[in-house]
Image (cartoon, grey):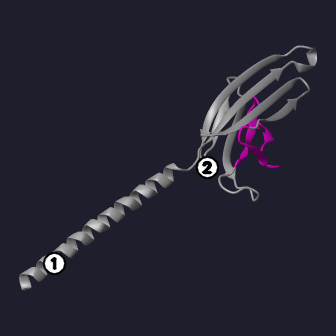
Amino acid sequence: MPIIKVVIEAGGILSYNFCMRKISFIFLAVLAFSLEAEAKIGLNVSLVYKKGIGKGFFLSTEQHSIEQVDEREQVMISMKNGIKAELSAYYVQSVHEYGPSGFVRVKGEVYNQSGKVVKTLNEPNLDIYLGETKKITHEERNQEEIDLIITPVSL
């Protein structure tokens, strides 16, 4: 009798270890998938510089980019002439919607050729629906214009 008792107890220990391994594997798999399920934000950004506007004709320089932005990450779009935009974006949960948000809040600054901040996107908040386009314009000396055109998309 004692030999059979030991075998039964050993079998119980083996099935317990197997069960714990299975649970650990499932837990790690769920954790890995939950980290990958976070939606990424893509920003279609166009930076346009127009010079000589008041003279009846103008010279236009454009920089187009598609940037992938994670929360708390800033991206920079710059032109050869020194004009640049530093942007960050994150999802904003709407109280009127259930599920993933369709709103993206964009923050950042636009710099002119000398490196001076000419436009801040922090106040008021720049909230844009996914797929919509917003245009931010800064005019200098009635002859130069900097346009920042942003369209957020979900990646």
Dot 1 amino acid type: Ile
Q: Answer whether residue 149 is magenta in the image.
A: no
| Residue at 66 percent of width and 39 percent of height | 153
User: Residue lying furthest bottom in this view?
Assistant: 1
> Would residue 10 be found to the left or right of residue 143 on screen?
left
Question: For the magenta stretch, what is the residue range?
Answer: 102-131
Q: Answer whether residue 130 is magenta in the image.
A: yes
Most foreground residue, 35 or 137 = 35
Alpha carbon separation for disc pair 1 and 2: 54 Å
Element type where label 1 sits in the image: helix
| Residue at 67 percent of width and 50 percent of height | 91
Element type where label 2 sits in the image: loop
- Residue 129: horizontal and vertical position, in percent? 74, 44
- Residue 33: horizontal and vertical position, in percent? 47, 52
Disc 2 crowd rating (10 Å Cα; few below 14, some 14-19, many 20+) is few
- Residue 51: horizontal and vertical position, in percent? 83, 20
Q: Which image quadrant for residue 113?
A: top right
Dot 2 amino acid type: Glu
> Would residue 74 be found to the left or right of residue 48 on screen?
left
Q: Which image quadrant for residue 58?
A: top right
| Residue at 85 percent of width and 25 percent of height | 144
Residue designated by label 1: 8
Q: Is the N terminus in the top left, top right, bottom left or bottom right quadrant?
A: bottom left
